[in-house]
Image: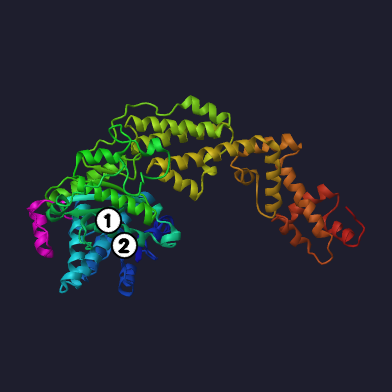
Amino acid sequence: MNAIVVDDDRSTVDVIVEKVHWSKFHIDRVLRAYNIQEAEQIFQSTDIDLAVCDIEMPMGSGLDLLKWVRDRNLETQFIFLTNHERFDFAQTAIQYRASGYVVKPFQAERMEAELAAAVRKIRHEEQYKVGQKYEKWFSGNLSYVEASFWSDLILGYIPSKPEVAEAEIQHRRIPVRSDAQYRPVLVSTSLSDADPALWGKDGEGTFEYAVGKLSAEMLTGRTETGRVVSIRRKDILLITVILDAEDTAALSSAVSTASAEPGRGSSGYAGPQGDSALRDQAPDGRRSGSDYAVSQGDSALHNKAQKLIDFAHNYLGCTLTVYLGKPGAVTEAAQTVRHLEELDRNNVASKGHCFEEDDEIVLHMADGHILNQERIKELLAGGRTRELLNLLKFSMESLAAEKKLDAAALSKIRQELLQIVYVYLYSCQIQATRLFANEAAETLERRATDSVMDMMRWQIYLITQTIDSVTQIRQSDSVVNRAKAFIHDHYRENISRTEIAASMYLAPEYMAKLFKKETGISLKQYLSDYRIRVAKELLARRDVRISDVAQEVGFDNFSYFSTVFRKAAGMTPNEYHNQASAGNITE
């Protein structure tokens, strides 16, 4: 897809283009315009899918550009930038189908949230157009059009009002009855389960299609995907399958009489790999979330859901969790799916099972600290990695047993643990923000609240990195050697103790003090001595130029280089070169 950023402030345009992660929204090309006229020229020569545009500009407003685009029947999605919210602007933007707006100053996270919504709209419109294009072919068209209807309904693009829903059903000519009962079933899995070895490097799309297709076939017995809605929330894939009265009747008449070991399907699979106490903790305190759901809902549908979970584990290599909504009117579907999504967000300890909509997966938790902070500080200071990780694991097991482990609890655990670790690292003169400023750390931290297993992966990384770094720093000879190695590799560059300390995530003052204590000389002096030593080696060559040597060893100012060299060697660089190249100096 192509996007354009329009703003009369060039710095704003540059910041938006450079700070937003466009590629994750499948936007390949981002163009820039600094007024409405430039933007119109680009629109005339390039297909633009999405526009980020300032509302108030001196040579024409963003709303003028939006009207111009709509007058030409272009379906570009618009996200507006504005310094303040004004009703008249919002009214016009809605009239011309703008996607959203972001209030300045620019924030990448807010912008990316609006981009995600705009891209979803683009996809839904494309899907709907595909349905319209092939409407004459009933079998090929109906599935697209109906899927688009359910998707728009669940995402809120179609208001949950009977008259609006009925009008959409009639307009799209789909076999949905506004007076009938429909039952949403939500299937949740992590996109990280899309193993590249099985699905390919960029196999998330194929994985999404396979899970959706499999869910529809195993829950309804049909291959049509018209009642399958796929939504991504961060790294979570949510598939909603809509069952109708015919599906429910078929299930009721085909109740399986086969018995299975409690909590397991025919394959014997009992949920995701990991600690059994966390994995099998059910909402009512029994060993299995599956048993709980069987006693509460339609056993036939539950059995199909469990077979789906088992099949996905064995053949797709992923963990599915299924949530069975209650039957209701068409207009109740969106609310039901939102409730099921909330259950999934709170279900962090019982993945890989089937639940009913009214299952109470977690209970309210009182305010206060979740973790034993003093004990964690003690183990952290003692470098006792295994004991600390076991303590954290036990804390989550206890919460799960009390039905108090949900996404909010995981978020609080993450917050408390980060605060303890950052304070501890600061006391050790280590800069935590630099230590964890890498993609792996950021990804693990972001996913930590998705599930217990994700939280445990993050905790292992966080605690291991922390204790290992502190252990290395406490070995002062290691710090000195690493500082020297950094100087040897970077002496040609304009470096100071700040850059040297940053390479070890240390505070500059602390590292400089430690270096002088161990070596007897300052970092600055060691750097200067090493540069002069290399300069002497280069000056011993016959064909070298003095000015080149100065630059080679990190001196931009030749006069300053001569001063430092003379102070260290007792003669000027030129004198040293003449004598050394003639063989009169040996070192």
**Residue furthest toward the front?**
258
Look at the picture and state if 3 lies above or below 318: below
Gap between marks 2 and 1 measured at Cα: 36 Å
Residue that carries the numbered disc 1 in the rendered image: 215
Residue type of the residue flagged with mark 1? Ser
Q: Tell which tag, 2 or 1, sits nearer the viewer.
A: 1
Of residues 477 and 94, which is closer to you in this image? 477
Q: In the rendered structure, which segment of residues is drawn in magenta?
A: 157-182
Of residues 544 and 183, which is closer to you in this image? 183
Which colour scheme appears in the figure?
A: rainbow
- Picture quadrant of residue 76: bottom left
**Residue 106, percent from left and from top:** 37, 51
Question: Is residue 106 among what the camera can see?
Answer: no
- Picture quadrant of residue 250: bottom left
Residue that carries the numbered disc 2 in the rendered image: 51
Q: Are marks 2 and 1 in contact (CB under 8 Å)?
A: no
Residue type of the residue flagged with mark 2? Ala
**What residue is at 83 percent from the left and 54 percent from the top?**
572
Instruction: Give residue 32's mark.
Output: none
